[in-house]
Image (spheres, rainbow, N blue to C red):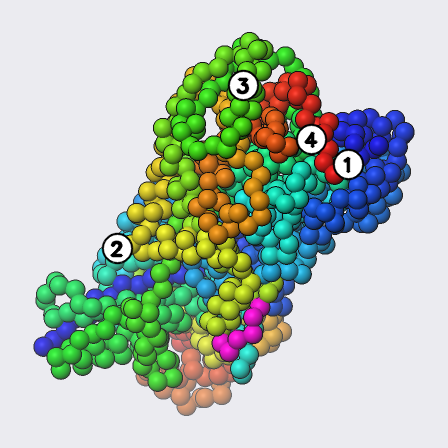
């Protein structure tokens, strides 16, 4: 029997706020352990939480970017469980009445519904060393949003693409850096199989905390294989929570349904219900930054880019920003700028193993190079050399051109002299050309280019040669 | 004798520089030394530190400090920076607070001194202070009897005058009931009137810090300092704070006092009712109208309270897990460490309530218990709203009995819970209420409770002030 997977995702995203969800401690990655803490995020006796307004704004923005209905009334609830890096013995989250529900996101033309989006706080970190465990509470209290999809995902690839698209939307909305490697975006997978073409739901398995896009796809592939094997031999799937081991590429059981905790959710009596005015929601909507889809469409419409180029420039927000930044210095030819950015510039970045941020060639420098090309000062061939040099030295293209005398020779008088010299140096070929053997034109242009080390403007050389012949 | 003087007089003397701050502190320190061995009101006395602070304050202008050099005893569940905050629990023994509660910040700014952290039932769970993990506090009127609780230490401190004022906390009657047992005034402010920041939570939706004292005006002065909106407490209210101490001397006329008939269906100790009738007659004599009212759902107050409070407590007390601070039991793994730490660190009443709350919040029981209790709570609140359409204040005894003997009720939790039968509904409704001494049944004090509209502590203080002029309960000092 053939099976098809039914996949839903639960994604935790760290909001990019300056301070924590319920106190004023700074949110920072990589600080000295337990240095960014206060009575509130340490859960000291007597401390009380106060909601971070910016986190609420970001959550609303994320919800709107995911086409959710944002509720004017939502409730913070306590999720009770014991864990060493959970300082209060409960996590403040939202349960029965979340901030937002009923959204959707489009991935490659397929609509994936978002069931809910709610605000909560992150726990600290347990660091295991040998037989010891250390607790770092710097992360405790970092604002998170949890996004839960409907089980609308039907393939491992789509799951990965969904996450990549989601990451982009969140970055564009300016609510999170959503870097999976830094744990700013974490994903739990719910997966069940059913006979292909049916609409009944099988027993679902949860896979916890998979920490890269690639692993999400792999974990799903491997779990589909595992479940399919069990089902096709007449076995039964156990409802349980599993973990993914990237080294083996397999999932392993963590706890069964019977061992699952009862979180004893109830409304947090330390916090009032979160009441958001309708006008506030509209205000956030009105000031929403441009989202990937809008940018993609704008790049095609305003800059006449190909759909492929527009997609590449949109998928990586930083690259699109770089592009627009370069255009702000020299807006003459977006298409040319895009070509150079996506081909030669990215080639250099890749070859040198640099990130966009580390590039010594900034948007302004790139725009200067484009200008030199566009104005015919540099040929494509020379421009490539200059770009390489720019990466070497970090110098402006004009400086390099000046220093190395790379400027294209566009001065007719000096070119006439050079053409004359070349003709004189090859009297036989000159005679044959004069007697009508026009295919030798190419030979002479080549010789002139050689003599000028490629700096001559080929069109101009052609023109001069024709003139000399007709005299 | 300085320690016998009310705060408002001490402030005058200090302003006129007739006494020095250190003399004031010294006077109460001596009184503490005379009485403490007998009553044991304090877990951590801090008079020495207060004396030091008094000397530092001596050069300052008294006009800048509304509670200039006034000693105040603080219940040991309110954080004072640098001092232990034990909540009378082994699990927090030795923990030093790294920060001040908002009320303490305000007291310090007002020039008051913390002279000690007072004994209480562990985590404020109890009605007799017998559940302190360290030692019981004794009722100064009869050392064989309990002082009430959970703020027993704070009530005894002002009863024996080792401090002229104290702070307690009231979740179901924990200020008013010990005030009643010890013959002092105790005020539970409206929920949201006083910041809870720094008060170790028992049941967050019910907890409120409040003052205890012997004179209404003193209590009013303290209320002025501790009240008011605090951005650190999301449940604190943005409501203006009146000058309570000035308002209480204003004339009151034409008040209607309601007597809830249901409260008198409960069993009451002989003599308590007579004291209360006498109390009511006094107001009637002043021309106030007395009217019988009905609070039909108040009979469910105790069961409702004993669902909601333990539910919140089970979560609030989850942080005492031995990981970061406080008591930690030795164990072979983390789960055993949690279990042993909490088993050895908490006393019987705290464990009882954690278990109750954990059970009531569990899947399958949440709707039947917690949600149902929240619905009844809303009905109890509505009863009061209806009643306050007819009357301005509601009066009843604070507790159905006077102070009971040690050990009398610890074996029977339900009987212990019934000591709060007249007080818990006030917390469920979030209202202000005051307990004032209204008489005696064989040498033991009896308290009368006045319940007000939300944020109308003023009327309660006015009525207390009128009564105090008539029945000078403050003149009698035990020990």
Say which residue label 3 marks: B280
Q: Residue at x 46, y 21 (%)?
A: B259
User: CA separation, marks 3 and 4?
Assistant: 20 Å
* Local secondary structure at mark 1: loop
Disc 4 chain ID: B
Tell me whether marks 2 and 3 sit on the same chain: no
- Residue B42 to residue A313: above or below: above
Q: Few, some or many C-alpha atoms within 10 Å of disc 2 (few <14, some 14-19, many ≥20)?
A: many
Left or right position of A130 against A466 = right
Q: Main secondary structure of the magenta part?
A: loop
Looking at the image, which residue sits at the far bottom?
A: A428
* Local secondary structure at mark 2: strand
For the residues carrying marks 3 and 4, which lies nearer the camera in this image?
3
Q: Is residue A116 visible?
A: yes
Rendering quarter of residue A193: bottom left
User: CA separation, marks 1 and 3?
Assistant: 33 Å
For the C terminus of chain B, the quadrant is top right
Q: Residue at x 65, y 14 (%)?
A: B250
Tag 2 near tag 4, CB within 8 Å = no
Q: Few, some or many C-alpha atoms within 10 Å of disc 4 (few <14, some 14-19, many ≥20)?
A: many
Say which residue label 4 marks: B214
The magenta segment is B328-333
Q: Nearer the viewer, residue A53 or B248?
A: B248
User: CA separation, marks 2 and 3?
Assistant: 65 Å
Q: Is residue B384 visible?
A: no
Say which residue label 1 marks: B70
Tag 3 near tag 4, CB within 8 Å = no
Q: Nearer the viewer, residue B360 or B238?
A: B360
Q: Residue at x 60, y 68 (%)?
A: A33
Q: Tell me which numbered mark, 1 or 3, is placed earlier along the sequence.
A: 1
User: CA separation, marks 2 and 1?
Assistant: 63 Å
Say which residue label 2 marks: A113
């Amino acid at each position: 029997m053939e099976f098809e997977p039914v996949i839903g995702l639960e994604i935790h995203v760290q909001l990019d706020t300056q301070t924590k969800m319920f106190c004023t401690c700074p949110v920072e990655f990589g600080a000295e352990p337990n240095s960014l803490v206060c009575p509130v995020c340490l859960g000291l006796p007597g401390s009380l939480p106060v909601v971070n307004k910016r986190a609420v704004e970001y959550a609303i923005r994320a919800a709107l970017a995911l086409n959710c209905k944002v509720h004017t009334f939502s409730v913070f609830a306590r999720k009770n469980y014991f864990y060493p890096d959970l300082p209060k013995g409960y996590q403040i989250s939202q349960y029965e009445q979340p901030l937002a529900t009923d959204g959707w996101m489009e991935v490659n033309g397929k609509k994936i519904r978002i069931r809910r989006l709610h605000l909560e706080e992150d726990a600290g970190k347990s660091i295991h060393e040998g037989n010891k465990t250390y607790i770092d509470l710097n992360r405790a209290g970092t604002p998170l949003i949890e996004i839960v999809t409907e089980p609308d995902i039907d393939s491992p690839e789509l799951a990965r693409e969904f996450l990549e698209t989601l990451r982009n939307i969140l970055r564009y909305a300016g609510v999170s850096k959503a870097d999976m490697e830094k744990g700013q975006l974490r994903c739990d997978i719910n997966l069940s199989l059913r006979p292909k073409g049916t609409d009944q739901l099988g027993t679902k398995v949860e896979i916890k905390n998979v920490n890269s896009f690639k692993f999400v796809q792999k974990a799903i592939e491997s779990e589909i294989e595992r479940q399919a094997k069990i089902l096709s031999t007449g076995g039964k799937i156990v409802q349980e929570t599993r973990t993914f081991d990237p080294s083996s590429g397999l999932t392993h059981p963590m706890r069964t349904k019977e061992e699952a905790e009862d979180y004893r959710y109830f409304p947090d009596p330390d916090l009032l219900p979160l009441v958001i005015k309708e006008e506030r929601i509209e205000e956030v909507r009105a000031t929403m930054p441009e989202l990937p889809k809008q940018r993609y469409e704008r790049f095609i419409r305003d800059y006449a880019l190909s759909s492929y180029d527009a997609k590449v420039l949109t998928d990586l927000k930083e690259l699109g920003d770089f592009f627009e930044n370069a255009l702000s210095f020299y807006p003459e030819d977006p298409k040319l700028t895009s070509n150079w950015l996506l081909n030669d510039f990215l080639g250099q970045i890749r070859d040198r193993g640099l990130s966009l941020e580390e590039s010594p060639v900034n948007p302004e420098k790139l725009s200067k190079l484009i200008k030199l090309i566009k104005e015919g000062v540099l040929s494509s061939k020379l421009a490539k050399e200059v770009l390489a040099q720019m990466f070497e030295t970090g110098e402006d293209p004009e400086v390099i051109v000046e220093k190395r005398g790379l400027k294209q020779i566009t001065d007719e008088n000096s070119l006439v002299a050079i053409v004359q010299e070349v003709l004189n140096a090859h009297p036989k070929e000159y005679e044959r050309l004069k007697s009508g053997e026009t295919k030798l034109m190419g030979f002479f242009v080549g010789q002139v280019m050689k003599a000028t080390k490629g700096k001559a403007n080929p069109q101009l050389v052609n023109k001069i040669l024709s003139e000399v012949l007709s005299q | 004798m300085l320690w016998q003087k009310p705060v408002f007089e001490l402030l005058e003397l200090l302003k006129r520089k007739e006494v020095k701050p250190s003399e004031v502190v010294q006077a109460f320190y001596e009184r503490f030394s005379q009485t403490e061995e007998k009553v044991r009101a304090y877990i951590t006395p801090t008079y020495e530190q207060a004396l030091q602070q008094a000397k530092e304050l001596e050069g300052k202008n008294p006009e800048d400090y509304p509670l200039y050099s006034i000693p105040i005893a603080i219940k040991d569940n309110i954080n004072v920076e640098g001092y232990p905050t034990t909540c009378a629990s082994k699990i927090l023994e030795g923990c030093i607070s790294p920060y001040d509660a908002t009320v303490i910040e305000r007291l310090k700014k007002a020039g008051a001194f913390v002279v000690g952290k007072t004994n209480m039932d562990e985590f404020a769970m109890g009605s007799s202070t017998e559940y302190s993990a360290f030692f019981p506090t004794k009722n100064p009127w009869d050392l064989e009897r309990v002082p009430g609780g959970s703020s027993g230490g704070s009530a005894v401190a002002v009863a024996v005058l080792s401090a002229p004022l104290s702070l307690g906390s009231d979740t179901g009657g924990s200020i008013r009931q010990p005030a009643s047992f010890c013959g002092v005034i105790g005020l539970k402010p409206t929920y949201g009137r006083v910041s809870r920041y720094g008060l170790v939570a028992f049941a967050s939706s019910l907890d409120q810090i409040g003052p205890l004292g012997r004179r209404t005006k003193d209590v009013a002065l303290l209320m002025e300092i501790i009240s008011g909106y605090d951005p650190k407490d999301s449940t604190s209210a943005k409501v203006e704070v009146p000058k309570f101490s000035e308002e209480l001397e204003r004339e009151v006329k034409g008040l209607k006092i309601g007597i809830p008939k249901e409260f008198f269906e409960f069993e009451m100790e002989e003599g308590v009712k007579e004291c209360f009738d006498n109390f009511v007659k006094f107001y009637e004599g002043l021309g106030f109208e007395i009217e019988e009212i009905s609070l039909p759902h108040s009979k469910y107050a105790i069961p409702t309270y004993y669902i909601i409070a333990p539910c919140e407590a089970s979560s609030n007390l989850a942080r005492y897990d031995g990981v970061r601070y406080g008591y930690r039991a030795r164990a072979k793994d983390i789960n055993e460490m949690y279990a042993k730490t909490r088993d050895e660190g908490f006393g019987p009443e705290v464990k009882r309530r954690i278990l109750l709350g954990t059970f009531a919040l569990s899947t399958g029981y949440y709707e039947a218990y917690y949600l149902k209790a929240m619905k009844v709570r809303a009905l109890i609140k509505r009863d009061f709203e209806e009643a306050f359409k007819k009357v301005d204040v509601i009066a009843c005894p604070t507790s159905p009995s006077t102070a009971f003997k040690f050990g009398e009720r610890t074996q029977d939790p339900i009987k212990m819970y019934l000591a709060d039968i007249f007080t818990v509904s006030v917390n469920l409704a979030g209202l202000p209420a005051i307990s004032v001494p209204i008489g005696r049944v064989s040498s033991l004090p009896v308290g009368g409770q006045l319940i007000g509209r939300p944020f109308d502590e003023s009327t309660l203080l006015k009525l207390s002030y009128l009564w105090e002029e008539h029945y000078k309960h403050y003149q009698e000092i035990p020990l």
